Amino acid sequence: DAGVTQSPTHLIKTRGQQVTLRCSPKSGHDTVSWYQQALGQGPQFIFQYYEEEERQRGNFPDRFSGHQFPNYSSELNVNALLLGDSALYLCASSLGPGREQFFGPGTRLTVL
Amino acid sequence: GESVGLHLPTLSVQEGDNSIINCAYSNSASDYFIWYKQESGKGPQFIIDIRSNMDKRQGQRVTVLLNKTVKHLSLQIAATQPGDSAVYFCAETSPGGAGSYQLTFGKGTKLSVIP
């Protein structure tokens, strides 16, 4: 049984570019949450998707957007990249919005 | 503002000793707390959780203590092993709509086990 998978593993972009990160939830899970983890910090909640809708959002600008597909997989899009967007982006899935979250290995984004 | 923080950023312990990692939280409305372990290059891994109606919960070699009076959490690891070396985060949950919740993580404590 595959756990949460994320792609790509690493990504390098330049300021002003746009990026799309992908997440496949653990088998049977229908809820996906995204977190940003800066170096040396704890993860920060970006948003949560359930039933293809954004259900809850953290304190992130509109440059951060997402999508959930009918198969429960999800994408995180970041527009107009800033140097400060460099971080590890974590996806977590759960069996319902209020249940235990299982984390993927993350995508390391570097903005130059 | 509301925050979850840790008292010690780093902790070194001898293999076989017990480890105690502390965490302070400030949101008195938080009713559910989780400890995560994050190894290098991996995502956080659930260790143990506790609800606010409890003050202690035990797992395999781990115990979480909750003191609501002073808004303090601790994670105790018995007989610490080299494989316990990692960064440990406490997280509190804030309830959202439709039964959802978001996790608010502290900064983390790096545990190093000396063989």
Image (tube, rainbow, N blue to C red):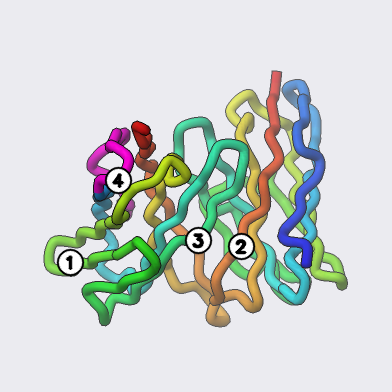
Q: Residue B16: which numbered mark, if any?
A: 4
Question: Badge 3 sits on which subunit?
Answer: B
Horizontal relation, residue A11 to residue A93: left or right: right
| Element class at badge 1 | strand
Residue on which the image places disc 1: B67
B42 w.r.t. B92: above or below? above
Disc 4 and disc 3: Cα gap in Å? 22 Å
Q: Position of residue B75 (x, y in %)?
A: 30, 57
**Could you tell me the amino acid type at mark 3?**
Phe
Q: CA distance from mark 4 to mark 1?
A: 26 Å
For label 3, the crowd category at 10 Å Cα-Cα, with few meaning under 14, some 14 to 19 and many 20 or more, is some
Callout 1 crowding tier (Cα within 10 Å): few <14, some 14–19, many ≥20? some
Per the image, the residue denoted by label 3 is B46
Please name the residue that numbered disc 2 is placed on.
A102
Q: Position of residue A26 (x, y in %)?
A: 73, 66
Q: CA distance from mark 3 to mark 2?
A: 7 Å
Residue sitting at x 80%, y 29%: A17
Marked residue nearer the N-terminal end (3 or 1) = 3
Label 3–label 2 contact, CB within 8 A: yes
Q: CA distance from mark 3 to mark 1?
A: 21 Å
Tag 2: amino acid = Phe
Labels 2 and 4 in the same subunit: no
Residue span colored magenta: B1-17
Farthest left residue in view: B69
Asked if marks 4 and 3 touch (Cβ < 8 Å), the reply is: no
